[in-house]
Amino acid sequence: MTVGTLNSSTLAMTLWSERRYPALRAVLLVIVGSALLIVSAKIKVPFYPVPMTLQTFAVMVIAAAYGSRLAVATVIVYLAEGLFGLPVFTNTPPAIAGPAYFLGPTGGFLAGFVVAALIAGIAADRGHDRSPVRLFLYMLVADIAIFALGFVWLAWFAQLANGTGIGPAAAWTGGVLPFLLADLVKIALAACLIPAAWLAVKPKSDAI
């Protein structure tokens, strides 16, 4: 990725229109975005039968605000922080971050964040980030990608104490089904938040 090819029409670039130091701007946005991902990983949503965080919401908001290239870079930086042992993930601590963490039950979901950032970011690249309906559809596809990668990894490849994978039935009932409704709510909120932010920074007539 080169800084000069970043989409200048995204929400983040519009809000921060300073053009003299594009590389610094990109680096700072990545830092802010990765910090948001860390915070979202540590926030547990109460009154829900299974542990649930705001990471999906954060990934979608970052992607829609940044565009695909900067969003993917942000998620990769976040994952790299965990790869090098920083406690940036939901279960760290007590779990220990590092390469082995990615082999565990959540490895597929973490990889899915990269794909989701790309898909939802493409919506911003194409100007669909000003339409709640269009943005929601992109985010829905992005969310499906997260669940698909997470399901496949958890079912057949996750390295667990009692073997490899938990099987498709258990992966569906334990890793996908309990989160579907909550994720729909989170992406709906994200799909409304970004267009609302555009209305705040652009004349109403410019909204799509």
Image: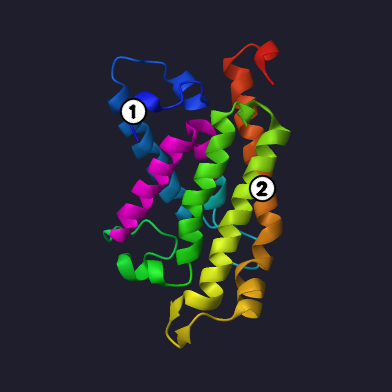
Residue 58 visible to the viewer: no
Q: Which residue is mark 2?
A: 140
Amino acid type, mark 2 = Leu
Q: Does 40 appear above or below 104?
A: above
Q: Does 80 appear above or below 173?
A: above
Q: Is residue 41 left or right of residue 19?
A: right
Nearer to us: label 1 or label 2: 1
Residue 108 visible to the viewer: yes
What's the magenta region?
Answer: 59-83
Residue at point 57%, 41% (across, down): 120
Q: Which residue is mark 1?
A: 3
- Residue 204 placement (x, y as % from top left): 68, 14
Q: Nearer the viewer, residue 106 or 89?
A: 106
Query: Can you name the residue that lies furthest to the bottom here?
Result: 162
Residue at point 46%, 75% (across, down): 158
What's the magenta bit mostly, secondary-structure-wise? Answer: helix
Q: Find numbered disc 1 in the image and state the secondary structure of the residue it sits on.
A: helix
64 in the magenta segment: yes
Quarter of the N terminus within the rendering: top left
